[in-house]
Image (spheres, rainbow, N blue to C red):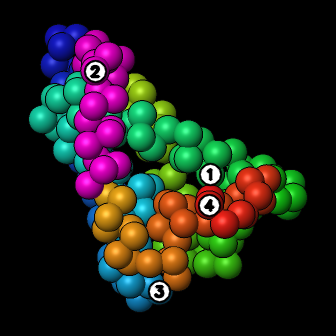
Amino acid sequence: MKKRTENIILNVIGIFLVAAPVMRLFFLQGYETFAQFFWLCNHIPILIGIAILLRSPFWLTAELSLLFAGMLLWVLDFIFYFSSGIVLFDSAVYIFSASGTMFFYLSAITHLLTLPLAILAVFLLRKPEPNAWKGSLLHAVILMPIIAYIGESYNINFLLKPGVSFIPDFALY
């Protein structure tokens, strides 16, 4: 019975992590371009959801580790700004200009729930992969030329310029 319950929970998490970002990208279409898909927070939850549905601890761990730091900073910034009105890292303030829209709600839910749900899935799968860094590296290597091609105007994943106020912007950033 316990294994069946864990499988149901994993399936629900996986479906949510695929469906919520896809719906978010659908609503994002009216605001931005397809380039927005390449933000880690826009496509990694989908990949994490697929990894969970396929019961792949390697890809779950790889994608979670690639997303973790940036998403954690975004979530902390969002919660701090939402609760106090004070900008902490200047990474989540943009979302409040869309306050009250479906984009706002889907973005907030997706950002706030991805990390805890993915971490729960790692524990439920009971197999964190120590070599998953190789998958993270492969994902990053594939993504870098795409981001460079898209260009500086979108600054996807802050590859070309810093995205938070506490990192200085200099020529070789």
Q: Which mark is residue 172?
A: 4
> How far apart are the alpha carbons under marks 1 and 4?
24 Å
Question: Which residues are the magenta region?
Answer: 121-142
Q: Could you say whether the residue bearing mark 1 is in a helix, strand or loop?
A: helix
Question: Is 107 colored magenta in this rendering?
Answer: no
Q: Considering only order in the chain, which callout, 4 or 2, is on the residue closer to the N terminus?
A: 2
Mark 2 vs mark 4: in front: 4
Q: Which mark is residue 31?
A: 3
Q: Considering only order in the chain, which callout, 4 or 1, is on the residue closer to the N terminus?
A: 1
Give neighbour class at mark 4: few <14, some 14-19, many 20+ (Cα, 10 Å): few
Given the image, on which type of amino acid does mark 3 rest?
A: Tyr
> How far apart are the alpha carbons under marks 3 and 2?
38 Å
Q: Considering only order in the chain, which callout, 3 or 4, is on the residue closer to the N terminus?
A: 3
> How far apart are the alpha carbons under marks 1 and 3?
20 Å
Q: Which mark is residue 74?
A: 1
The majority secondary structure of the magenta stretch comes to helix
x and y percent of residue 152 in the render?
51, 77
> How far apart are the alpha carbons under marks 1 and 2?
26 Å
Mark 4 vs mark 3: in front: 4
- Is residue 122 shown to the viewer in this render? yes
Q: Residue at x 42, y 28 (%)?
A: 119
Given the image, on which type of amino acid does mark 2 rest?
A: Asn
Q: Nearer the viewer, residue 146 or 71?
A: 146
